[in-house]
Amino acid sequence: MAEKDKVYKCLNPVAVQIPVDTSPLAPRLSSLNGKTIHFSITGEPDITIPLEKRMKADYPNVNWTVKKTYGINPLTLSDEEMKTTDGVVLGVCW
């Protein structure tokens, strides 16, 4: 077989793209005072430790709820938390 007759087969590294459902962003909150904001931390807790402290210090009138996991998937909010949470901050660190 000559050089020009070689056929190379390549796999697409992206693979098959499965369509995902998209949702519009929620409207911006007019104020954070008195709101419940959920802080979800995944991965190694390096920068998120001082970030959590700073956010709580800078926004003392916010009711903060926090869930942490060392895995790559954030812990999901319960149905009750979904009803009472006004905003979410998701921090991923590795």
Image (cartoon, rainbow, N blue to C red):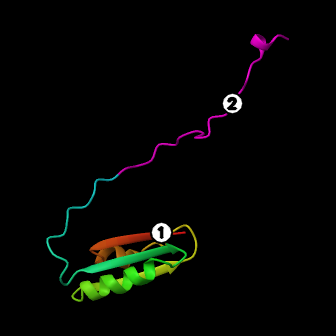
Residue shown at 62% from the left, 40% from the top: 13
Residue shown at 53% from the left, 67% from the top: 73
Q: List the residue tagged with mark 2.
A: 10
Q: Which residues are magenta?
A: 1-22
Q: Amino acid at mark 2?
A: Cys
Residue shown at 19% from the left, 84% from the top: 34
Q: Is residue 64 at least partly visible in the picture?
A: no
Above/below status of 30 relative to 24: below
Q: Secondary structure at mark 1?
A: strand
| Residue 72 part of the magenta-drawn span | no
Q: Position of residue 76 (x, y in %)?
A: 46, 72
Mark before the other along the chain sequence, 2 or 1: 2
Q: Say few, some or many: other residues with alpha carbon within 10 Å of mark 1 (under 14 / 14 to 19 / 20 or more).
A: many
Q: List the residue tagged with mark 1.
A: 92
| Residue 4 part of the magenta-drawn span | yes
Left or right? Give the position of 9 relative to 62: right
The quadrant holding residue 78 is bottom left
